[in-house]
Amino acid sequence: MHLGKPELDATPPGELPVLLTCNTRPGAERWQRPAFGAPTGVTIFRLHVTGSLAFVSQAAALLQAEEQRRAQRYHRAEDYHRFVLGRAAQRLVLGAYLGLPPAGLHFEPGAAKKPRLREAPGLHYNVSHAGDWVLLAVAKAEVGIDIERLAPQFAFQEVLDYSFSPAEKAFIERSLVPTHAFYQLWTRKEAFVKATGRGIDAEFAQVPALDGQHHVASPGQVPRWVVSTFEAAAGYVAAVAYPAALPGPQQFYELGNDVLDELYTVAPSEPYVLR
């Protein structure tokens, strides 16, 4: 629960307002086979956890010691599998872009404590997972992504006053499917604060999420941002946030078993070229 009353379009003294555009992509996404060339625009990968269980042992072997210790703290098998497979997928995808061994990549805190890749700090990424899915967004600029599993029984009304503006609250309550509307706006806010490194507890309620354009306090040097809702999978809601200046449309790639098999078996010292 995020405390504090939302103040839409509030700009703290000394900060320049930036333009934030929120939208919803039309129709279902086409999740294609990955192509690891030079990244352009925003590239989104999805991994189905249950469908990838055959790779758990190989995934665990890619992780460094600290990651393996973190994995062992999960007591439920599904949580362990989601962490190990998701973390390994992150290494595989970024290694494929860079032509570097995935097990040798180093992640460290960057600006606003956002993790960054030591070997290529200009290649930005963000990860989110929920239920049976892991999403990874990659771009050559700040990016944030969030996925949530629709939970019809979740009492979202308890957090409306703390995390949403009056207009957002009205939008949710008047929607034909209020639970879906809640998660739509929630994932947009999550994606934006993850992309910008803003304090989620302090400013979550102040991040606008309705369709259209909004002015918000500058989270850095980027003057225009986009937050886009897209269809991640049946029963899930997702959103991605990125600078509007990034070229090209969003690209959606599936980390299916055929792709994973090639990524896990390719020689680690060679650039990745998928067949």
Image (cartoon, grey):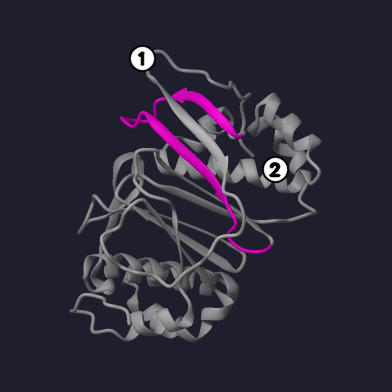
Where does the image place residue 244, in percent across and percent down from the top left? Answer: 39, 38
In the rendered image, is residue 50 in sight? yes
Where does the image place residue 157, in percent across and percent down from the top left? Answer: 77, 39
Left or right: 83 in relation to 124? right
Task: Please give the residue where the numbered disc 2 appears in the rendered image.
Answer: 182
Left or right: 135 in relation to 166? left
**Residue located 55% across and 60% down the image:** 29
Residue 234 versus residue 164 in the image, above or below:
below
* SS category of the residue bearing label 1: loop
- In the picture, which quadrant includes the C terminus? bottom left
The residue range painted magenta reads 211-234
The residue nearer to you, when weighing 258 against 159, is: 258
Disc with the residue nearer the chain's start (1 vs 2): 1
223 magenta-colored: yes
Where does the image place residue 168, in percent across and percent down from the top left? Answer: 68, 31
**Residue located 25% across and 60% down the image:** 38
Q: Amino acid at mark 1?
A: Gly
**Residue located 61% across and 26% down the image:** 4
Q: Quadrant of residue 112?
A: top left
Q: Which mark is residue 28?
A: none
Left or right: 271 in relation to 110? left
Q: Residues within 10 Å of mark 2 (few under 14, many from 20)?
A: many
Task: Please give the residue where the numbered disc 1 appears in the rendered image.
Answer: 14
The residue nearer to you, when weighing 251 against 109, is: 251
